[in-house]
Every structure is written in structure tokens, then in C-alpha cells.
């Protein structure tokens, strides 16, 4: 599948600001590709919209590996060794870029109930989301599942 057949997720759950996109671009230019993206069977991006956008702008070619999800695909960089400075820089930049994005709570709330989000790794909701939503989280803590410390209330 040529890269022009890859489709962006128009309902992406993450927002990338210009600073984050610049950091992704810097990482690609200085360290090369270090992360894969994930596509569904129709070529729509499940994960990696910003990575694909940045790679496309930088002219980085795309190689698609087909899988049914039962095998973990490991990307092995043959040009990097454990103690290479470039490898360490790539590891730091990769982690840093993923930490700098914001969740798109409009898209999340369209697909998930608020009470589902803590078990999916979303532990804090913005105040604006809870004010006008029928189901309001009064307390969210780092919960792998629902517990008595999670209370729900209906907005008046």
C-alpha cells in the first residue's frame, strides 16, 4: 500500500501542538525513524497520525508490515548500539514527544463513557468536560478499575 493510500484518523484522540510536531521533526531528522505507526485493514491510522505527518513531510519512506495482531512487531535499528549517543537521544526524544501531547476530550467522550476512561489510562478529566456532562467524575485516582473511591454524580 503506497503511503498516499494511508488515511489519517479524523477522529484522533490526541492533539499535537506546533512544539510537539517540531520535536517529532527534529527526532526524525537527527535520529531517523524510531517508532512505527498502526493502521487498520482499510489503511486508516489507529496510532501515529503525527508521526506519519512528520515523516511524510520529511520524505521518510513507509514500509507496511501486515499482521493480525497476534504477533508483536519489533522494529530493530541496525545502525544503533546500546551505548550510542544517537540511540540515547532517540530514546529520550521518543518518550518526550509522547509526553507532550494533549487528549482530545471531545473525541474521547464521543466514543467512551466517562467512567470507562480511568481503566483505559485516562485518570484526569478537564473541568470543562465534567461541568456540562450528565455523568460527572467527582474523584478520579490512579485506578486500574472502578472502586469505591470513584463516585459519580449527575450534573444539575
Image (cartoon, grey):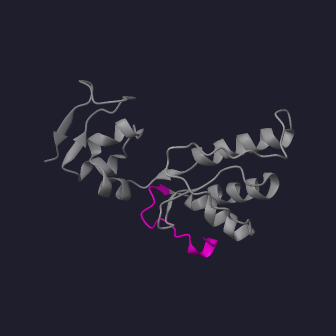
Q: Residue at 42% across / 63% down in the picture?
A: 11
Q: Is residue 1 above or below residue 77?
A: below
Q: Residue at 31% across / 51% down in the picture?
A: 129
Q: Point out residue 152 in the picture as x, y percentages from the top left corner.
A: 20, 36
Q: Quadrant of residue 51?
A: bottom right
Q: Residue at 66% across / 50% down in the picture?
A: 35
In this view, the residue farthest toward the top is 148
> Which secondary structure class fits the magenta region best?
loop
Q: Point out residue 24 in the picture as x, y percentages from the top left corner.
A: 68, 56
Q: Quadrant of the N terminus?
A: bottom right
Q: How many marks?
A: 0
Residue 58 is covered by the magenta coloring:
no
Residue segment shown in magenta: 1-14
Q: Is residue 19 above or below residue 91?
A: below
Q: Point out residue 26 in the picture as x, y percentages from the top left corner.
A: 75, 56
Residue 10 is covered by the magenta coloring:
yes
Question: Quick check: 69 left or right of 53?
Answer: left
Amino acid at each position: 500500500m503506497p503511503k498516499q493510500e494511508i488515511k489519517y484518523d479524523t477522529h484522533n484522540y490526541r492533539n499535537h501542538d506546533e512544539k510537539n510536531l517540531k520535536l517529532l521533526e527534529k527526532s526524525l531528522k537527527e535520529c531517523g525513524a524510531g517508532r512505527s505507526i498502526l493502521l487498520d485493514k482499510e489503511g486508516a491510522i489507529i496510532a501515529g497520525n503525527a508521526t506519519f505527518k512528520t515523516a511524510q513531510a520529511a520524505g521518510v519512506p513507509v514500509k507496511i508490515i501486515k499482521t493480525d495482531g497476534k504477533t508483536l512487531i519489533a522494529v530493530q535499528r541496525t545502525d544503533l548500539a546500546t551505548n550510542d549517543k544517537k540511540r540515547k537521544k532517540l530514546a529520550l526524544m521518543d518518550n518526550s514527544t509522547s509526553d507532550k501531547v494533549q487528549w482530545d476530550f471531545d473525541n474521547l467522550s464521543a466514543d467512551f463513557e466517562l467512567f470507562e476512561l480511568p481503566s483505559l489510562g485516562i485518570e484526569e478529566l478537564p473541568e470543562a468536560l465534567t461541568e456540562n456532562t450528565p455523568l460527572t467524575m467527582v474523584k478520579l485516582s490512579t485506578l486500574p478499575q472502578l472502586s469505591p473511591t470513584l463516585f459519580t454524580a449527575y450534573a444539575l
